[in-house]
Amino acid sequence: MAKTSAIERDKKRRRMAKQYDAKRARLKAIVRDKSKPAEERFEAVLKLAEIPRNASKTRARNRCEVTGRPRGFYRKLKMSRIALRLYGSSGVVPGLIKASW
């Protein structure tokens, strides 16, 4: 099981990213628009820098919903490889069977 503080930090980052998503998108669109004056684009860059870094979607880490493990993560199932094997062996994941040959 992952540290509770790491899991909570990640949840906080996801909430922040959701909160600032529209503002970040608007400012980034202004920065990318070459038809706007340079001063206006520079102001948008400065405002973008004022937004907390944790408000970026890329700062959030994919974690297993069962254990909180950050590595060996399957996006489709939102589960780590270890939790997937545990639940697959006990028959909780539909359609998943242990291979044997």
Image (cartoon, helix red, strand yellow):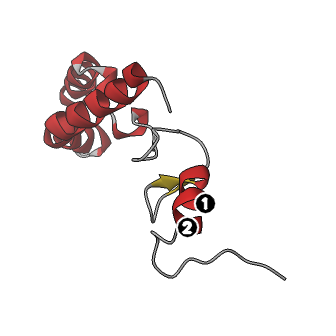
Q: Indicate the amino acid at tag 2.
A: Gly
Return the residue nearer the eye: 13 or 95. Answer: 95
Q: Is residue 68 above or below residue 4?
A: below
Crowd class of label 1 (few under 14; some 14 to 19; many from 20; radius 10 Å): some
Q: Quadrant for residue 9, please give it.
A: top left
At a point 47% along the width and 59% down the height, the residue shown is: 75
How many numbered badges does the structure rendering display? 2
Q: Indicate the amino acid at tag 1.
A: Arg
Q: Is residue 36 above or below residue 42?
A: below
At a point 14% along the width and 43% down the height, the residue shown is: 22
Write down the residue under mark 2. Answer: 88
Write down the residue under mark 1. Answer: 85
Residue 8 in picture, x, y percent from top left: 32, 26
Side of 78 relative to 85 (left or right)? left
Q: Are marks 2 and 1 in contact (CB under 8 Å)?
A: yes
Residue 86 in picture, x, y percent from top left: 57, 57
Under circle 2, the secondary element is helix
Q: Quadrant for residue 51, please give it.
A: top left
Under circle 1, the secondary element is helix
Which quadrant of the rendered structure holds the C terminus? bottom right
Q: Quadrant for residue 30, please give it.
A: top left
Residue 97 in picture, x, y percent from top left: 61, 78
Crowd class of label 2 (few under 14; some 14 to 19; many from 20; radius 10 Å): some
Say if residue 37 shows up in the picture: no
Q: Is residue 31 above or below residue 79?
A: above
